[in-house]
Amino acid sequence: MTLLSLEFILVAVLVICDVKAQFTPFYEEVTSGGKESYSSVEIENQTEEDDQGEPSRRNFEDLLQKIHGNIPNTEEISNSANQILYMTQRLLEEGFSFEKVTSDSVAAGIKDALILRGICKSPTVYKCNALSPYRTIDGSCNNIQYPERGKSFVAQRRAIGPAYKTGTVGGPRVTGVTGKPLPNPRTISNVIHSNKYGVTINGTISLHTFQMGQFLDHDIIQTPLETVTGGCTCEENTRPECISIKIPEGDPFFTKRACLPVKRSAAANPDCTPGFRQQLNTLTSYIDGSNVYGSTEDELTELRDGGYMKTSSENNLPENPNDGCVIDHNGEFCHLAGEARVDAVPSLASYHTLFVMEHNRIVNALKSINPSWNVEKLFQEARKINIAQMQHIVYNGFLNAFLSLDTMITYNLLSLNTGYSFSYDPKRDATVSNEFGIAYRMGHTWIPTYQDLYSDLNIRLLGPEMGPFDLVKTFNNPHLTFLNRKKGCPALLKWLTSEASPATDRFVEDSVRNRLFEDSPGDGFDLVSLNINRGRDHGLPPYGDHRVSCGYSAVTSNWNSLVDHNTEEVELLRQVYDDPRDIDLFTGLLTERAITGSSLGPTLNCILGREFQNLKEGDSYWYERPEPQGFSIAQLNEIRKTSLSAVLCANLDLTRIQSDAFRLPGISNYLVRCTNVPSIDLRKWKSGTQRLKPGYGRETQQRNLQTGQMDMDAQSSQSDILQELIKLASGGEK
Ligand code: HEM
């Protein structure tokens, strides 16, 4: 250890001691909205009077919190991350360079000291079974060398480094390259994403693209929010956990409110290393049906019933007695599913129901084919087949509904017709990227303004249950799923099959751009403002930086450098942004001109293509792999026959359907009888007697070397810590 390192460690010790000393006061200040800290948000000034006239704000915030998941241990993770951020910031203020503070040797020393002080937990030790035929529920051990990659409750990856407010390690950017304030997210939303022309329909894709899009999102990513006692309000916008959005003067819709109160995404640093603020993913990143089976063993235990997934009557999802969804009819209840956002809209609940039905259908079939299989074997095999079908459907129907063929080829997204795929690459990290979490919100442009129930293709249910139902009335309210004598889900799925999706463009319908989670007129929210704001909250660099990372030309101070934008969009961007280099990621992506063969622009094709390549090539349980992680060739060839249409036919009382349910029926997408839709033949799973021990999938044994939080008061004195770190610095005992 050099003298410089020793000096550094000594300063680090003082800072760590300072963190300890500051621990309680720091958090008291934070939660009481006291003085500014390193990450305070300089949105725009508001006064106390401004905040009046928001009777339902709390309701909205509860719903938004629910959408991000009320995850019990997020607070603990975020507390520890906030302390490391504070410490990193202090070391920088002491004059150490960022490179020095984050260098491997120094980071390791600091990590050890923080674990010792109880600020961080000891790393989990994984004992992985490389030959397990079944993936773990929490995604651990998918990558044997890096068992936490793609696991639930790890930090989101970044394709490119963060861009936080200058001089901070986690403050959102508030000024642009010229030093002027960045435009207000709501202003950008009003000028660029407001749909003045009414809903434009996409002539080819069906509403399944919208609904599979959201369902898939809930298999891959959920970013939890900071816990804010009392919530965020307009006058408290200096609280570091808040990033509320001011309503600009003269807003055409929100006339009575001062701001949209927003909590920041929870800070995350599960690795306990000094550096920039990161965000958590509470789900497994892999496409592994975590929206059906959950992302933790505890969740699965709640959902599973032997080999089957629990249901309520008419094959509906079971009840969640603890959920805060809106129930306004007797006998109805909130749903329990593998993912907490299940009741966001009823058509999403219908997707959860479909894949739970499919699991149980597979179990029934396997049971009659293999009467000797015990429940564990039945459960694990059915789960494995269900996940394989989901992966096949995503890469052979969903993605090509909006990505170009060129993108599908460039990023190796096309499945093989025969044989095994050998594209698994253990060096590829499948952990979801932070930029994907913003870019993939392009699906918000597909959100329809209503929900509906059909009895068969193109036939609306008649009688008192006749729709269409205003989308706004369906947020977080499962009522539609209980209609049609509790067969609302099949009726919603038939509606999704028959109707066209809103076009993929820069426009987002007012149902979510003004009235998201609206309780009474004017108290709703703007999803677009939230998307733009969230990008700044996460420290995502502007659009231009992502272009460069995709290999496209840079965006400069010259508006002509926006080579993938049409004149109309450039003019609108000029109205709000001072400089093209400030354009936020979400807005820059959605205003790009679509490339040939895709409804999206080049940078979106790149960001999504890259992500889905990671989710395929970084998944050791990818369905096209050989056994033990994959299938026999005969079984794989059966999975290759499946499609969304096949799964819908197998579980609904449908007579006919178009071959590709992601697209509307038409000349190249004929309606066919369900009996003629190719589907999986489960007899290829016939085998000899096979019994698995209960809990076979839980081969990951995790052990905490040293358990988490220590009692702060009982910590050793400053000189003890100093001694320990000096030993550490001079290569002594660890
Ligand atoms: C009615 C349908 C939908 C509603 C009401 C909805 C609502 C929301 C809300 C409230 C958020 C959190 C915003 C924030 O606080 O930052 C969100 C996040 C997100 N949405 Fe949607 N959304 C819908 C459909 C979709 C679709 C169709 C897609 C993609 C195809 C999508 C992709 C995403 C993604 C990727 C996130 C970020 C998730 C995370 O990091 O936690 N959403 N959505």
Image (tube, rainbow, N blue to C red):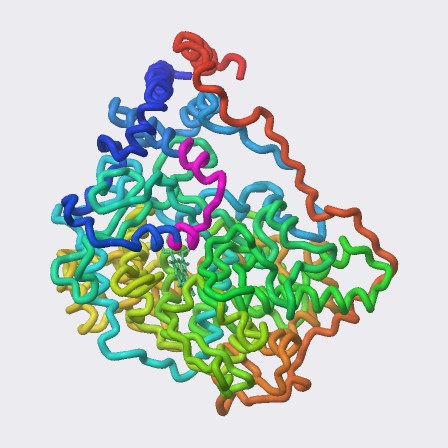
Residue drawn at 74 percent across, 74 percent down? 681
User: Which quarter of the picture shows residue 561?
Assistant: bottom left
Would residue 176 be visible to someone looking at this image? no
Residue drawn at 30 percent across, 36 percent down? 169
Where does residue 620 sit, x and y in percent of width and height?
62, 53
Q: Which quadrant of the render holds ligand 1?
A: bottom left
Is residue 309 left or right of 466 when viewed as pictured?
right
Q: Which of 228 and 717 is in front in this view?
A: 228
Q: What stretch is highlighted in magenta?
A: 63-80
Above or below, 484 against 526 in this view is: below
Is residue 625 left or right of 488 when viewed as pictured?
right
Where does residue 24 sit, x and y in percent of width and height?
35, 23
Where does residue 608 sit, x and y in percent of width and height?
42, 62
Residue drawn at 56 percent across, 55 percent down? 320
Q: Nearer the viewer, residue 545 or 523?
A: 523
Above or below, 389 against 310 in this view is: below
Above or below, 613 against 228 in this view is: below
Is residue 367 left or right of 289 when viewed as pictured?
right
Q: Nearer the viewer, residue 405 or 508?
A: 508
Q: Does the magenta stretch include residue 38?
A: no
Residue drawn at 69 percent across, 44 percent down? 698
Above or below, 156 against 610 in this view is: above
Check the picture and name the quadrant holding the N terminus.
top left
